[in-house]
Amino acid sequence: MKITVVGTGYVGLVTGTCLAETGNEVICVDIDAEKVKQMQSGIVPIYEPHLDVIFDRNIKAGRLTFTTSLDEGLDHGEIIFLALPTPEDEDGSADLRYVLGVSEEIGKKIKSYKVIVDKSTVPVGTAEKVRATIAKNASCDFDVVSNPEFLREGFAVDDFLKPERIVVGSSSEKATALMQKLYKPFVRSGNPIIIMDEKSAELTKYASNSFLATKITFMNEIANYCEAVGADVDKVRVGMGTDSRIGKRFLFPGIGYGGSCFPKDVKALQKAGRDSNYEFKILDSVIRVNEGQKIILLPKIDAHFKGDLKGKKIAIWGLAFKPETDDIREAPSLYLMKGLLERGASLQVFDPEAMPNIQKRFGNTLDYASGMYEALDGADALLICTEWSIFRTPNLVKVKQLLQQPVIFDGRNLYDTNDMQEAGFNYVSIGRTEIKA
Ligand code: UDX
């Protein structure tokens, strides 16, 4: 099939590349000429495991091309995916400027039947707005469907190629049939393509992300309470997670959720609720708890250094909002680093992939280490913000030798508390007993 993807952010790029992989002819459109040039020469602009291999393969096969020309894109595709940014507005709502701007152009330019697919996470009612915007100028037949993307950064390719489910909001039989044809190769294992109305599809995405953010936040509160009463959240987590109604996943407490989706989507749903005179009280709490959770280690660090961090050197492992990505959007590390810098500490940081992005934002206010052990050299404590696999089994003897003091603040509960006790560390984690060296 002939497919056009407008917007080559995480979602657009993965969508375009994976659709080319099943034999479709895909054109990706982006207004950023520099980025388009880069992609044309085979460079993937983001770090996403496995994407480079299929990107390269499909470019070479001629199935995946890039252009800055929306006209070219609109001539090509029978299905036009909108994978445009929906940034957070000042009031928390999703800004539809880009989605509606491109819709306006689509209305003016299409010459034959097209299915326009909202792939971006958009508020309930957007498909209707897109439809109305296109209809103002359209001289031919078209349909608008909502097809929210559930991919996780770091697993995006896998999530796209083997989705647990595909949600399509469509009220047109013709458009539904085309979407089913397009997605058939991805659901060979029998996973469902769930067809519903556009509004329900739009809400499914927000509801899913908000639910997951709530699940994590609930566990974070349980963890905080565990500390208050001397219980161990690891044990509580396992006890709870083995109840199949609850499930094992997304119960890991830590220094809060971050990234491009959860924070933005939870706020957008809260705001959308308000606009419809519905107050999501649960989401209000989730946002509040998560804000506090991101900096929950600061008072503990303060307490350890008796309120005086001036001139102290803190090593930080992990800056990305989660492992397997270079994305630092809403990463807890940002908030912790800000707090520590304000207290006069100096920071020696390391992340396997996110250093360039951090460097762009923090410039020379940080010391960038060449490796995880280099970051420890002469530091007064180690703070862990992201659970990259390489941090899970460090050489503890080496860690202890390199640090001035054997002190670890672990925002991701990477280590067994008994092991840390044996190794002679001061070890502070989330929802578990503090270990004194
Ligand atoms: C998420 C959704 O999973 C995905 O379906 C949606 O399309 C986009 O948003 P992503 O933001 O890539 O994907 O990351 P995810 O792996 O879901 O993690 C989100 C945040 O929750 C991270 O900050 C992570 O550290 C945190 N998290 C996750 C926890 O704190 N505890 C957990 O148990 C799980």
Image: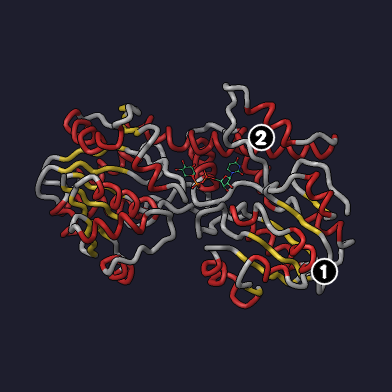
* Residue that badge 2 annotates: 218
Disc 2 versus disc 1: distance between alpha carbons?
Answer: 36 Å
211 left or right, relative to 71: right
Q: How is the image coloured?
A: secondary structure
Residue 394 screen position, x and y as percent: 68, 57
Q: Which class describes the residues within 10 Å of circle 2: few (<14), some (14-19), or many (20+)? A: some
420 left or right, relative to 45: right
Foreground residue among 368 and 215: 368
Vertical side of 318 occupied by 360: above or below: below
Residue 189 screen position, x and y as percent: 33, 30
Please tell me which residue is depicted at 29% across the width and 64% down the height of the picture. Answer: 31
Which is closer to the viewer, label 2 or label 1?
1
Q: Disc 1 residue type?
A: Gln
Q: Which class describes the residues within 10 Å of circle 1: few (<14), some (14-19), or many (20+)? A: some
Vertical side of 156 occupied by 190: above or below: above
Please tell me which residue is depicted at 23% across the width and 47% down the height of the picture. Answer: 80
**In the rendered image, which quarter contains the C terminus?**
bottom right
373 left or right, relative to 177: right
Give the number of the disc on residue 279. none
Q: Disc 2 residue type?
A: Phe
93 left or right, relative to 347: left
Residue 210 screen position, x and y as percent: 53, 37
Vertical side of 186 occupied by 292: above or below: below
* Residue that badge 1 annotates: 404
Vertical side of 37 occupied by 203: above or below: above
Foreground residue among 414 and 321: 414
User: For residue 173, which quarter of the picture?
Assistant: top left
Please tell me which residue is depicted at 28% across the width and 54% down the height of the picture. Answer: 6
Dot 2 or dot 1, earlier in sequence: 2
Please tell me which residue is depicted at 43% across the width and 37% down the height of the picture. Answer: 205
At numbered mark 2, what does the secondary structure look like: helix, strand or loop?
helix
At numbered mark 1, what does the secondary structure look like: helix, strand or loop?
loop
